[in-house]
Amino acid sequence: MHLPPIATTTVGSFPRPNCLAHRTRSHITFRLDGALLQEALDDATLLILKRQEEIGLDLLTDGEQRRHHFISNVLAAWDASTPSISVSQTTTAALCSNGACPV
C-alpha cells in the first residue's frame, strides 16, 4: 500500500442509515435481526467505504456501523475479575501524580 506523506482518515464513527437503527441518546436499537441485520450492516459498511473513497480519504474504515456504542468493545472485554476503579480514586490518582494530592 502506497500512502502519501500525510495520509487522511477519520476518527470515530459515521452516521448509520436511519433504516438500520434507531438511536435514543446513546442507546442503539437495530431495526432488523439475524441474517437480515448482517446483510444490512454489510450494505451500510459498503456505503460508508464508497463515501470515504468519494471524498478522497487515504485510509478507509468500516465507519463503526456494527458497534452499539463507542464503549461496547471495552466493556465486552472486561470480566468480573477486572478490578474496578471509582471516579474519585481516578481523580485522586491524577491529582497526586501532578503534586496536588488532597489530604
Image: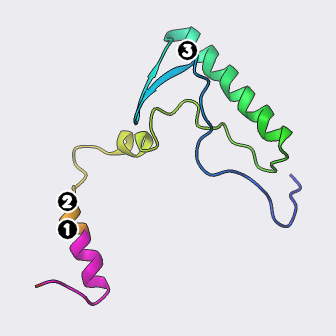
User: In the image, 46: left or right of 17?
Assistant: right
> The residue tagged with tag 3: helix, strand or loop?
helix
Label 3 CA crowd tier, 10 Å (few <14, some 14–19, many 20+) = some
x 78%, y 35%: residue: 51
Magenta span of residues: 91-102
The numbered dot on residue 51 is: none
x 32%, y 86%: residue: 98
Residue type at tag 2: Ser
x 22%, y 44%: residue: 80
Q: CA distance from mark 1 to mark 3?
A: 41 Å
As drawn, 85 above or below 97: above
Q: Which residue is mark 2?
A: 86
Whether 63 is among the magenta residues is no
Q: Nearer the viewer, residue 3 or 24?
A: 24
Q: CA distance from mark 3 to mark 2?
A: 37 Å
As drawn, 68 above or below 71: above
User: Nearer the N terminus, badge 3 or badge 2?
Assistant: 3
Label 1 CA crowd tier, 10 Å (few <14, some 14–19, many 20+) = few
Measured as percent of width and height from the top left, residue 102 is found at: 15, 83
Residue type at tag 3: Leu
Measured as percent of width and height from the top left, residue 11 is found at: 62, 52
Measured as percent of width and height from the top left, residue 17 is found at: 62, 24
Q: CA distance from mark 1 to mark 2?
A: 5 Å
Q: Which residue is mark 3?
A: 37
Q: Quadrant of residue 47?
A: top right
> The residue tagged with tag 1: helix, strand or loop?
helix
Q: Are marks 1 and 3 in contact (CB under 8 Å)?
A: no
Q: Are marks 1 and 2 in contact (CB under 8 Å)?
A: yes
The numbered dot on residue 89 is: 1
